Image (cartoon, rainbow, N blue to C red):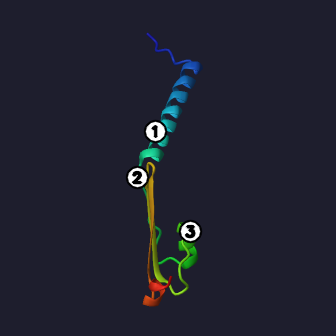
Amino acid sequence: MSQELPTRRTRARWIVRIVMLAVVVYGVWQLFGLHVNDPPRPATPAQAHAYTRVALPPGARNIGVAGYRQWIEFAQYVRFDGFRALASRP
């Protein structure tokens, strides 16, 4: 009784099935998974602008940015310290 090795065709089918399963799992994770981005603090105004597209006042310091996305929901947060005059400026 000798075991027969799988043919190349059978082996190729299994490889294709495994790759397709991996692609589907990755797609579902990208679509429904929770993805959190929390870059290191403090960020420069240019880095915060590149991340959130929010123009910060020139006196902003100790800038923190973060964001998340899950399914169709996403949010980005910006936190910074500055003078009171910066916050009340129109």
Q: 11 or 22: nearer the eye?
A: 22
CA separation, marks 3 and 1?
A: 32 Å
Q: Earlier in the sequence, mark 2 or mark 3?
A: 2
- Residue corresponding to mark 2: 34
**Discs 2/1, front:** 2
Amino acid found under the numbered disc labelled 3: Arg
**Quarter of the image with the N terminus in it:** top left
Q: Please tell me how crowded label 1 is: few (under 14), some (14-19), or many (20+) other residues with Cα within 10 Å.
A: few
Identify the residue at horizontal 49%, vertical 36% (top origin): 24
CA separation, marks 2 and 3?
A: 22 Å
Q: Position of residue 21 (x, y in %)?
A: 48, 33
Amino acid found under the numbered disc labelled 2: Leu
- Element type where label 1 sits in the image: helix
Amino acid found under the numbered disc labelled 1: Val
Identify the residue at horizontal 56%, vertical 72% (top origin): 49
- Residue corresponding to mark 1: 25
- Element type where label 2 sits in the image: loop
- Element type where label 3 sits in the image: loop
Q: Is residue 41 visible?
A: no
Identify the residue at horizontal 57%, vertical 25% (top origin): 12
Q: Position of residue 70 (x, y in %)?
A: 42, 52
- Residue corresponding to mark 3: 53
Q: Earlier in the sequence, mark 2 or mark 1?
A: 1
Q: Please tell me how crowded label 3 is: few (under 14), some (14-19), or many (20+) other residues with Cα within 10 Å.
A: few
